[in-house]
Amino acid sequence: MDTKAIGKILGPRFDAVPADGARALKELGLAADAAILDVGTGNGNFAIYLASQGYRVLTGEPGTDKSHYAGKDWALNAKKVGVLDNIRFQAFDASKLPFESGAFDAVFFFGVLHHIGENVRSEVFREALRVSKENGAVVFFEPRKEMLERIWVDDPGHPLAANPSNYLPGRRTREHRIEGSLMDIFIYRKAAASLLCE
Ligand SMILES: C[S@@+](CC[C@H](N)C(=O)[O-])C[C@H]1O[C@@H](n2cnc3c(N)ncnc32)[C@H](O)[C@@H]1O
């Protein structure tokens, strides 16, 4: 099923994903069998988008999260659009990922970092870098103004976007930012010793 057809079934929150998702995937050039972690399942929109592009996805959120955006029936959404087989769920907290170092080609956070307490964001970033491969990527999507204005209609208390670079842990990374249509995309890769910023 193409993303337009999926959007008709899942609605506007899914429609916010494909254009900016495609920008990130184009930049990453992931292999078809890439190991992918999607942090912060929510309604499953981003995991479903990745699955619709043919990837197998491991997604999760804390089993204890009782917030408005957690514990949603992502599996029903995935089933409705025929991609449930490509998505596996495991409960986890991003500040203590239960995965081996270097396990993933890409670790995605779609609309998630601003929902994580400021005091643990650096730890979450450090963990995402730890579980990504040496040539892997950590990718944050954070809402731009227009997206926030849409969200605030239903959820006036929704937090402002986070800037991941404020939480960069103390290791060398290369950052690449892409201005999306609704989300800003921040891509981080582990830098070789001679490259770029701390
Ligand atoms: C707005 S939802 C994300 C939307 C989702 N990515 C999508 O595409 O539909 C925010 C998510 O962040 C998750 N989250 C918050 N704190 C977290 C943490 N410490 N570790 C993992 N996920 C967390 C919540 O449980 C929730 O699933």
Image: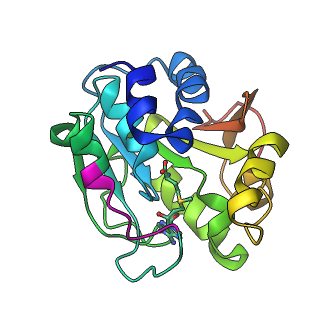
Q: Which residue is at a point 68% across and 61% down the rendered structure image?
A: 154
Q: How many marks?
A: 0
Q: Position of residue 99 (x, y in %)?
A: 31, 60
Residue 132 visible to the viewer: no
Quadrant position of residue 19: top right
Q: Which residue is at a point 52% across and 27% down the rendered structure image?
A: 18
Quadrant position of residue 82: top left
Q: Position of residue 20 (x, y in %)?
A: 61, 28
Residue 104 visible to the viewer: yes
Residue 144 against residue 158 in the figure, above or below: above
| Majority SS type along the magenta span | loop
Residue 141 against residue 61 in the figure, above or below: above
For the N terminus, the quadrant is: top left
Q: Position of residue 100 (x, y in %)?
A: 30, 57
Q: Which residue is at a point 23% across and 35% down the rendered structure image?
A: 83
Give the color scheme: rainbow, by chain, secondary structure or one colour: rainbow
Q: Nearer the viewer, residue 142 or 152?
A: 152
Q: Residue furthest left?
A: 85
Magenta stretch: give its range: 69-76
Q: Was residue 61 drawn as part of the magenta stretch in this picture?
A: no
Q: Was residue 73 drawn as part of the magenta stretch in this picture?
A: yes
Residue 188 against residue 37 in the figure, above or below: above
Q: Nearer the viewer, residue 60 or 33?
A: 60
Q: Which residue is at a point 27% across and 34% down the rendered structure image?
A: 81
Residue 62 against residue 22 in the figure, above or below: below
Q: Position of residue 71 (x, y in %)?
A: 38, 70
Q: Nearer the viewer, residue 187 or 150?
A: 150
Residue 95 lies left or right of residue 117; in this view the side is: left
Residue 2 lies left or right of residue 83; in this view the side is: right
Residue 64 lies left or right of residue 125; in this view the side is: left
Q: Nearer the viewer, residue 150 or 107?
A: 150
